[in-house]
Image (cartoon, grey):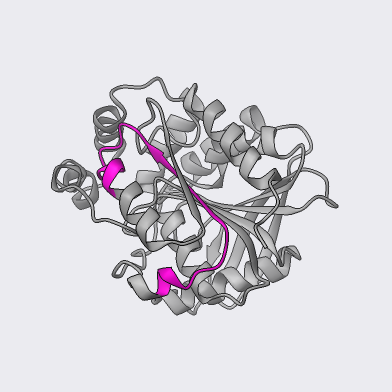
């Protein structure tokens, strides 16, 4: 408990200070443990499920909850095994199939069949794999924010800078890495405290794997929006956009000016541009 208490206090601080009044937290049972979800918006509105990048927690979506919660029931999910308030069960998540089964159980528990599904970074990798494996009625629309390991690999320089933080996690190394990747952007102080505290939170090894096969991507019929960070150091945004446009027949791509990989989705002014593009995509009718 002593390890997690500062983290959980920081988590609750972000939720109380940044998320809109009326936010509700729920716990969804799954075969892999209990999943914590922060939700905002009318319960009668179309569901929008948000998956954060590794270590970022569901709280990172506060700007999207406040904006998109006006038209959607926003569900921000803490990944099981990752820092957050989800609690892993005895059955571990070890494969992509486990991840998709877990997310299916979460969607069932939220009564969010036919939802719009959005992920950032590692969360985008999970969202894409789920859309590829799910039946057509499961995912109505797909939004991928600076997706990693989906259409291109990581830049070697990014991995080199991340290595000290990965080998010996700690608040100082996390802060140094974020300063480097974001160009010392002024991230929200409360969320930054939480992100640094996450370095001391016990977590499982994330499920990783190869990028989706081109043939599988070519068969994806879900309308997809891919928003890339102009200054992302994780990968080459231009290359990712070109590859995604070639492989995904129902995808739109756009670049968020000035954004970096880790300043998404919360840092202004990129968050305003991000929200606007997401809103337009969610509002538009799907092609028949």
Q: How many labels does the image show?
A: 0
Residue 193 falls left or right of residue 38: left
Residue 97 vs 281, above or below: the answer is below
Residue 37 falls left or right of residue 169: right
Q: Give the range drawn in magenta.
A: 216-239
Residue 186 vs 86, above or below: the answer is above
Residue 177 vs 186, above or below: the answer is below
Q: Is residue 288 visible?
A: yes
Residue 61 is situated, as x and y percent measured from the top left of the image, at: 57, 40
Looking at the image, which residue is at 70% across and 71% down?
Answer: 108
Looking at the image, which residue is at 31% across and 55% down?
Answer: 243
Q: Is residue 13 visible?
A: no
Looking at the image, which residue is at 44% across and 31% down?
Answer: 193
Residue 210 quadrant: bottom left
Residue 142 is situated, as x and y percent measured from the top left of the image, at: 56, 56
**Does 9 lie within the magenta span?**
no
Residue 19 quadrant: top right
Residue 278 is situated, as x and y percent measured from the top left of the image, at: 59, 41
Residue 63 is situated, as x and y percent measured from the top left of the image, at: 60, 32
């Amino acid at each position: 408990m002593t390890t997690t208490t500062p983290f959980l206090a920081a988590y609750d601080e972000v939720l109380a200070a940044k998320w809109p009044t009326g936010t509700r937290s729920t716990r969804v049972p799954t075969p892999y443990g209990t999943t914590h979800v922060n939700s905002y918006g009318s319960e009668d509105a179309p569901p929008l499920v948000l998956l954060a990048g590794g270590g970022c927690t569901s709280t990172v979506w506060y700007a999207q909850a406040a904006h998109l919660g006006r038209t959607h029931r926003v569900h921000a999910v803490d990944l099981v095994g990752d820092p957050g308030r989800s609690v892993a069960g005895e059955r571990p998540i070890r494969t992509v199939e486990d991840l998709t089964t877990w997310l299916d159980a979460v969607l069932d528990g939220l009564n969010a069949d036919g939802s719009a599904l959005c992920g950032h970074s590692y969360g985008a990798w999970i969202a894409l794999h789920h859309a590829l494996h799910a039946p057509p009625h499961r995912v109505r629309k797909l939004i991928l924010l600076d997706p990693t390991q989906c259409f291109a690999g990581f830049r070697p320089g990014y991995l080199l800078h991340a290595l000290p933080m990965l080998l010996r996690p700690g608040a100082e190394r996390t802060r140094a890495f974020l300063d480097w990747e974001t160009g010392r952007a002024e991230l929200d102080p409360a969320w930054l405290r939480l992100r640094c505290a996450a370095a001391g939170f016990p977590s499982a090894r994330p499920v990783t794997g190869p990028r989706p096969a081109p043939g599988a991507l070519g068969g994806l019929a879900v309308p997809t929006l891919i928003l890339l960070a102009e200054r992302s150091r994780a990968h080459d945004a231009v290359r990712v956009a070109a590859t995604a446009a070639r492989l995904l027949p129902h995808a739109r791509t756009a670049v968020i000016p000035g954004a970096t990989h880790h300043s998404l989705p919360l840092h202004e002014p990129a968050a305003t541009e991000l929200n606007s593009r997401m809103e337009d995509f969610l509002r538009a009718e799907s092609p028949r």
